[in-house]
Structures are given as structure tokens and as C-alpha cells.
Amino acid sequence: MRVKLKIGENEKKFINRVNELTGDNVYRCYQCGRCSASCPMAQEMDLLPNQIIRKVQMGQEEDIIGSKTLTLCASCFACQGRCPKGIDIAAVCEAIRHLLEPKGKDFWGPDDVQPELAKELPQQVLVAVYKKFAK
Amino acid sequence: MRVHYYPGCTLKEKATNLEDSTREAMARLDTDLVEPEGWTCCGAEYPLITEKIHGLIPPVRILRQVEIEEGSKVVTTCAFCFAVLKRANKAMLDNPTLHTRVNEYLADDILIDPTTKEKRTHFESYNGDVQVLHLLEYLRDEVGLGHLKSLVKRDLSHIKVAPYYGCRLLRPQKEVAIDDPETPTIFEDFLNAIGCTVVDFPFKQECCGSYLSASMPETSNEPSYRVLNSAKMNGANVVALSCPLCYYNMDTRQDRIKEEYLEFNGFPVLYFTQLLAWALGADVETLGLDKHLCDPRPLFDIKQNAEDVEVNL
């Protein structure tokens, strides 16, 4: 069955914004899937890293908004290191989180730390996680 | 020798065993570690998107302070601090837009000169001239592994060490890598130089779950367990690393890993500086070994106990 896909103005705007923020071009991805094979958190994800890139290529912002993947990326750069095109998927996830912030999406806040964890967490963890996920 | 040293926030509180063993080892290598005046947290994470320029301010301010104090190099042991400082430094060298914007922001700084006690308000642009080195690179390039080998005072050949690089020392390759990201050897070369038995294992550059242990604690057990289990299956009796966050995930959180993986019964994790200080003849009290959740002290017994240690593990 043939499906005709249409990328309208809103979709184009989203794709261009992601490209602008990452300084890259998501269309360079040809979906080989090495990123998903390398990802240490892939077992927890609802959208695999290569699927995130595909959704961005298609401008399907709505499908990405609710995805757990955006908060499961710990920026270890395994995907980027093994990508034949060198696409930085951690940066793509960060760009999407940045674009969702003005729409009221908050991925993490000071009240989300479990009290028993707060006592034992190293300082760098708290700084890193706020910087990554808080508005 | 005198060299600038950036400890980072975690080493002063939660990872004092990394800080103490680093200082102990460097004193034994006749290296005087100087902290830049008034240093702050480096920000822990480098901003990956072009609009978050504020994330570059703290690391560049630290690097500029090193330059003001006439330092040409800064050494770090924390892998996160290393990655942030090195990437920020490279951005100052390679990206003219970031160079201009960050320097314009920093031009308004006020600094009290520690010697004259006068206010200083005019600063030169920071151009990325300070060299950022991880301690492993410093030992390889400045001290020399051959020289280091000649200074070793204790026999560590009974300790089978699995070197764990994690993510921040190797990736992204063009910006931070201290060695080849897929087949690194710098950690192995260092461990060979101090006389440990090195164990290769396939998870040495896999992520341990990183800061997800704060935001989604239930998800970080599996990646940490995979690393520890792989080291154990390949015959190691300890994992060595350089990052306080990896240490937290793989040692401090071991009781939670045990709850999820019932066959797992604990595995010792050490900072590479603890092994270094011990090899150079430091007293066991200076290594902070009592802070570990999985007690590594049996490993530091004299050689004839080594076989018992392996049985206990």
C-alpha cells in the first residue's frame, strides 16, 4: 500500500528549528540503526534513537512529545561515536526538550528528587540532571 | 613541579577518597597541585545545543583564572569536569561566535587580586590557550609511564583490575577523547606501569546509567550491573574508574543492584588514584577505603593472602 506523506509548514518549522539548534542536518541519517544497537538505555525506550531521528525527519513532533526516550538519554554519545554520519542524537534530544519547554513541558524539577536519594547523591549528579532536564 | 589542578565540587564532599588519594599520589610524584583561586562548579554538563551559551560561562571562567595565574595546563581527575572543561576550551579555540559572546559576558567580571587586595575589572579575552589534561594523560605525557614504573614501591600483580573508561573520557572523539574511543589503551598502559594485572572486558566503554540514577533510579541498575558482571565474568577482582558518578552508580548503589539481581553478591570498585597511591607506597589510611560500600580492603593485603581474597569474592 502506498502512503502519501505531507510535510506542511509547521512540520518544516520544527525540522528547521532542530537543525538550527544542533548545527546539523537530520536528513543525513539513512536509518542504519547502529545508534539503537549501541544505546545502553534502548531496553527502556518506547522510541529507539533511530526512530526519534525518523520522526524528526518527518516532522512528527506530536509523536515525540510523550516519548520516554527524551528523559532516558544520558548523553553518553555511544550513538554519535558509532554513527557512520556522526549525527549527535543526544543533541537532537536536547534540542527537542528545549523546544518543548515553552509549551509547558517540564521534564524534571527540584521536588522530583527522592528525599532518601538527596542525602547520598554526589553533587555532580544533581547539577547534571537539573541542567539536562529542568526548564 | 607545580601544576594547576581543578578538583570539582564532588571531590570536596562525596568523593573525598578520590581527592585524598590524588593528592597523596601526586605528592609522591613531587608534583605540587595548585587550585585556581575562587573556582566554582564547572556545570557538570556541556550544553549540546547552540543557544545554551550560559553553560560555557563557568568552565571558561575557571580556565581564564588558570591563565591569569600564569598556568599553561590544568589537570582534572573527575571525568565529567574533564569533559566540560575540554569541550569549553575547544569551543573557545574553534568557534568565533562563542568566543566573542562568552568573552563579552565575562568582561564584566570583578576579581579581588589575592596579593594586592585591589579590585580588578579589565580582563583579556580568553582564547583557549590553557591545555586541559586528565590525570591519566598527565601521567602518560608529562610524568612518563616508564618513569612512573621506576617509582613503584609495592607489588600489585595479585590485583586483577578491569579498567572502566565510561563515556566522558572517550566521547565525543573529536572533542574530548584521551584515546581511541573503541579500542582505548591509556588506562591499561597506566595499570601495567604500576604493576597491576590488567583484565580486558567488553563493557569498559559502556555507559553506567549516568545521572539517570537521580531522575529515574529504577533504570540505572541494569547498565551498572552489566559492567560489574562483565568485569567479574572476565576474571577481574576489582573495577578501576575515574568518575565519582560512575563510582556512585557502581559502588554506592550496589545494595539496590543486589535487590534486583539476586545472583549478584557485590564487587569492589576503586578509583585509579587509590591504586596509584598504594603502588607508590602510601599508607592505607590515606586512601579512604572505609568509604566503599563493597569493602575493597582485602585486596590491599600482602601478597600471600591474594588467593584467599579471590575465594572470598
Image (cartoon, helix red, strand yellow):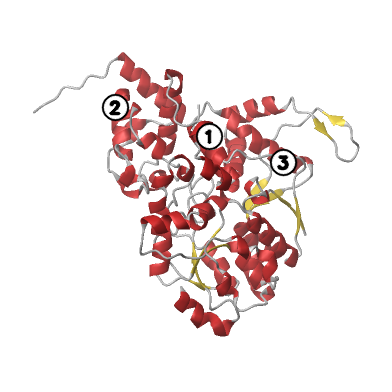
User: Contact, CB < 8 Å: mark 1 with mark 3?
Assistant: no
Q: Is residue A97 visible?
A: yes
The part of the image, by quadrant, that contains residue B99 is top right
The structure residue drawn at horizontal position 54% and vertical position 28%, both measured from the top left corner, is B52
| Dot 3: element | loop
The structure residue drawn at horizontal position 67% and vertical position 56%, both measured from the top left corner, is B19
Label 3 crowd bin: few (<14), some (14–19), many (20+), radius 10 Å: some
| Dot 2: element | helix
Spot occupied by residue A17 in the image (x, y as percentages of width and height):
41, 22
What residue is shown with label 3?
A: B39
Distance, label 2 to label 3, CA atoms, is 43 Å
Q: State which mark lies toward you, 1 or 3.
A: 1
Instruction: Establish if B115 lies above or below B270.
Output: above
Location of the N terminus of chain B by quadrant is: bottom right
Distance, label 1 to label 3, CA atoms, is 20 Å
Residue type, label 3: Trp
Label 2 crowd bin: few (<14), some (14–19), many (20+), radius 10 Å: few
Nearest the eye: B72 or A110: A110
Residue type, label 1: Tyr
Instruction: Establish if B257 lies above or below B158.
Output: above
- The answer to which of marks 2 and 1 sits earlier in the sequence is 2
Q: State which mark lies toward you, 2 or 1.
A: 1
User: Contact, CB < 8 Å: mark 2 with mark 3?
Assistant: no
Q: Name the side, left or right, on which A63 lies relative to A111.
A: left
Distance, label 2 to label 1, CA atoms, is 25 Å
The part of the image, by quadrant, that contains residue B122 is top right
Which chain letter matches label 1?
A
Spot occupied by residue B23 in the image (x, y as percentages of width and height):
71, 59
Q: Is the same chain shared between marks 2 and 3?
A: no
View extreme (bottom): residue: B304
What residue is shown with label 2?
A: A63
What residue is shown with label 1?
A: A130
